[in-house]
Each structure stands twice: as structure tokens, then as C-alpha cells.
């Protein structure tokens, strides 16, 4: 039962990280929009724009990683509860 409790904890942690990743993704998307506007107006350099775009890609990757971890934890919980979903 210790493993089940740990998986439940992992699932909750993954959900929280996923929510945080969603917020960071929205912020990074907005930062890219602002950077594009500023670049078009000559306020920032192309490198600054690229940095904003890189941050957006990193935020997208983080979200995917947390989604993956949540899936793995959920599958492991099913396995611990005796579900043989792979057969």
C-alpha cells in the first residue's frame, strides 16, 4: 500500500506541475507576441526575439514532460491496483 500512496502523491504532484506549466506556457506565448511586436517596431534585436521564442519552446517541452509523467504515474497506479492494461 506504500507504493499506492506514493503513486497518488506523484499523480498529485504531476497535476500541480502541469497547472504551473500551463501558466508558464501562456506567459511565454504572450512574451513572444510582445517580442514580435517590439521587433517589428525596432525596439529589440532579432536575438531578443529568438530568446523569447526559445523560452516558448522550453515551456511547451516542460508541459509535455509533465503530461508524460502524469501518464506514467497513472499507469503505474493502475498496475499497482491489479489492472493489466497492456494485455
Image (cartoon, rainbow, N blue to C red):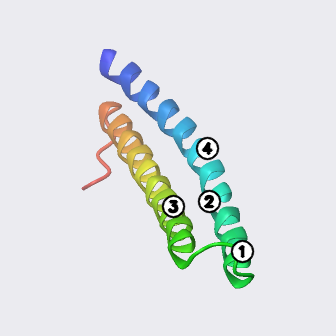
Q: Residue at x 24, y 56 (%)?
A: 87
- Disc 2 target residue: 28
- Asked if 51 appears above or below 17 in the picture, the reply is below
Alpha-carbon span between mark 2 and mark 3: 6 Å
- Asked if 18 appears above or below 86 in the picture, the reply is above
For numbered disc 3, what is the local secondary structure? helix
Name the residue nearer the viewer: 24 or 77: 24
Are there few (<14), some (14-19), or many (20+) residues within 10 Å of tag 2?
A: many
21 left or right of 80? right
Eye-nearest disc, 4 or 3 = 3
Q: Residue at x 50, y 66 (%)?
A: 51
For numbered disc 2, what is the local secondary structure? helix
Eye-nearest disc, 2 or 1 = 1
- Disc 4 target residue: 19
- Disc 1 target residue: 38
Whether tag 2 and tag 3 are in contact, CB under 8 A, the answer is: yes
Are there few (<14), some (14-19), or many (20+) residues within 10 Å of tag 3?
A: some
Query: What mark, if any, has residue 50 been given in the picture?
Result: none
Are there few (<14), some (14-19), or many (20+) residues within 10 Å of tag 4?
A: some
Q: Residue furthest top?
A: 2
Q: How many marks?
A: 4
Give the x, y percent position of residue 27.
Answer: 67, 55
- Asked if 18 appears above or below 33 in the picture, the reply is above
Eye-nearest disc, 2 or 4 = 2
Give the x, y percent position of residue 49.
Answer: 57, 73
Earlier residue among tags 4 and 3: 4
Give the x, y percent position of residue 75.
Answer: 36, 44
Whether tag 1 and tag 3 are in contact, CB under 8 A, the answer is: no
Amino acid at each position: 500500500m506504500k507504493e499506492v500512496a506514493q503513486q497518488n502523491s506523484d499523480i498529485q504532484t504531476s497535476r500541480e506541475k502541469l497547472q504551473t506549466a500551463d501558466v508558464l506556457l501562456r506567459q511565454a506565448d504572450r512574451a513572444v507576441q510582445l517580442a514580435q511586436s517590439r521587433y517589428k517596431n525596432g525596439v529589440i534585436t532579432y536575438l531578443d526575439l529568438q530568446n523569447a521564442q526559445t523560452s516558448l519552446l522550453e515551456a511547451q517541452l516542460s508541459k509535455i514532460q509533465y503530461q508524460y509523467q502524469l501518464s506514467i504515474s497513472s499507469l503505474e497506479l493502475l498496475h499497482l491496483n491489479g489492472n493489466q492494461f497492456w494485455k
